[in-house]
Image (cartoon, rainbow, N blue to C red):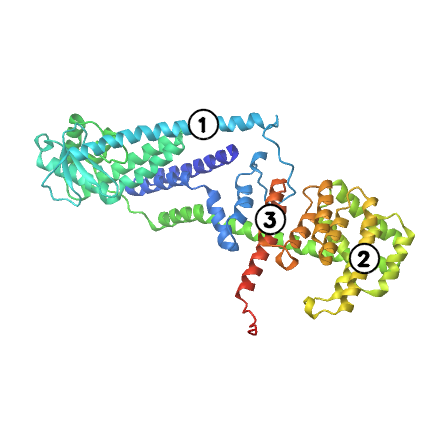
Amino acid sequence: MIQALLNHLWQSTLVVVVVGIWAWALREHRARLRYWLWFSAAVKFLMPFSLLIVLGSHLASRVSLTATVVPVLGRIVAPAPPELGIALFSAPAAPALTAASPSTAPHFHGVQLLLGLWACGAALVLGRWAVRWWRLRQLVEESVPLSIRASIPVRAAPTAMEPGVVGVVRPVLLLPHAIEEHLSADELRSVLLHELEHVRRGDNLTACISMLMQALFWFYPLVWWLGRRLMVERECACDQAVVAAGCDPETYAQGILNVCKLYVESPLACAAGVAGADLRRRIESIMTDRPRHALGATAASLLWLTALTTLLVPVAVGAALSSSLATAQSESSDSAQSQTKSEIAESRNLLKAGHYAELDQRMNAFQQAYRSGTLDELELQKAFNAFMLADPPLAAHFDAWLTSYPGSYAARVARGIYYFKCGIQTRGTRFAAHTTDEQFRGMRLYLEKSRQDFEASLAMDAKPMLSYNFLIRISMEDGSRADTRSQLDAALRLDSTALLARRPYMISLETRWGGSLNEMLDFLEQSRAAGLPDSKLANLQAVVDGERKWLQHQSREPQPATDPD
């Protein structure tokens, strides 16, 4: 968080420097141009480049922002501290540190302390401004309307505050009571023109945005300096507009001096007055009234180029990052699928070629990697899916493998998987009403052989989770819910978070297997209470969502008509 903040500050500071160079180069041009340059720098403090980069990635990939925010922020805040957990490409997650971890607790409390200090400072700044705003609103309520024709209501109040525009949505020009007794008619007219120019420009609204910047970044002196520059340029811009409208510069300057002598300055930047900024320089500028240069085509082009570069480069970077990320993810996915297919093909070729020693070493290495925690359980399942075959001639190869290595967990499980696949294929995929007794008998014979192999394998490895996975599935086919639960409980005693056990059991709770949606939801909550990580919970949630869709589809199916008794 701190690193991200520091990066945002230096990026915004760089923009201020660039704007400052442009403002100096345009010092002989109209103040309104410099004002909008400085205002753009203020807005940059409220708009991190990371948001523009995220926007670019979103526009380029047309995917959800949640899928692009993390990798993009990984680049924009790099080098990021470990607590951010941000990386450009996903990597295996490290075990989460507990709140009591001695290495993270001091840092965590330090961040909390800094956040508390920031909140106190922001609240103090906003609170002070809120009090001043409330006092201004009180003055407006106590004021009386004046019969002065203007684009906004003009009112007089018993106050020593200078003339000023109060309000953003429905602004009011508030004048001190009896100001006409202290200023000549021409002086008052020029002051009123100055205030109405603030209204035309929308200075109160832009001042509110600037004040928000100052409240959020109150600890950074540059934002206060920037707010002051905005005040100087806006007053200078209004002065130039008043003189350009035909007011006599000397009369106008005298009016400003009289206001400054008789009244106090407006307490808020968002209640634009007439006496702000450097008074001596303003008077000199008004009295000299030098012709202002028009912005040449070259300078205008460079200025627009700078602005567009500032906005479009982060968007383009986001688009490029999104494209590269999508390409990398696609290539990674294709590579993983290709690798899986290649591994499956290699295992099958070894089996068919009778290279049982190499095959046994290979498959037991997968199981050992899973047992040691270096291989994900779903990757283990993919590796052993090589034996999901229902080819009768292969039975002799599985027998020969097991004969050569009778104590091999991999060989026993591989043959059990083969028998399971043969049983499922023998039964077929049609509904029970359209399945023959011979098909059911054939399925049961194969599933019994499969069960025997899996039960024998339980004693051959310290973590036979793949065996429990198929034992649960066999119990499902047998229709024994009690046995299914028994197999699950035995598996969870070894690993309470095992998805290889929880997923097939969740499937066994579907209505087509004799369960119900409520049972599935209850099991999902039990799994959450057991401490399953989010990725595994999402896998179980997908099964629940699929069941909901199936039930909705069933409810829309027309029910068969029944003959009346």
Q: Secondary structure at mark 1?
A: helix
Mark toward the start of the polypeptide (3 vs 2): 2
Quadrant of the rendered structure where residue 140 is?
top left
Please give the label number shown on residue 20. none
Which residue position holds label 2? 448
The answer to whether any part of residue 323 appears in the image is yes
Q: In screen coordinates, is 496 left or right of 65?
A: right
Coordinates of residue 559 in the picture (x, y in percent): 55, 69
| Residue type highlighted by circle 3 | Ala
Q: CA distance from mark 1 to mark 2?
A: 66 Å
Coordinates of residue 161 in the picture (x, y in percent): 19, 29
Which residue position holds label 3? 538
Please give the label number shown on residue 116. 1
Mark toward the start of the polypeptide (1 vs 2): 1
Q: Residues within 10 Å of mark 3 (few under 14, many from 20)?
A: few
Q: Is residue 504 above or below residue 75?
A: below
Q: Secondary structure at mark 2?
A: helix
Q: CA distance from mark 3 to mark 1?
A: 36 Å
Quadrant of the rendered structure where residue 156 is?
top left
| Residue type highlighted by circle 2 | Glu
Q: Which residue occupies the foreground of this view, 82 or 517?
A: 517
| Residue type highlighted by circle 1 | Gly
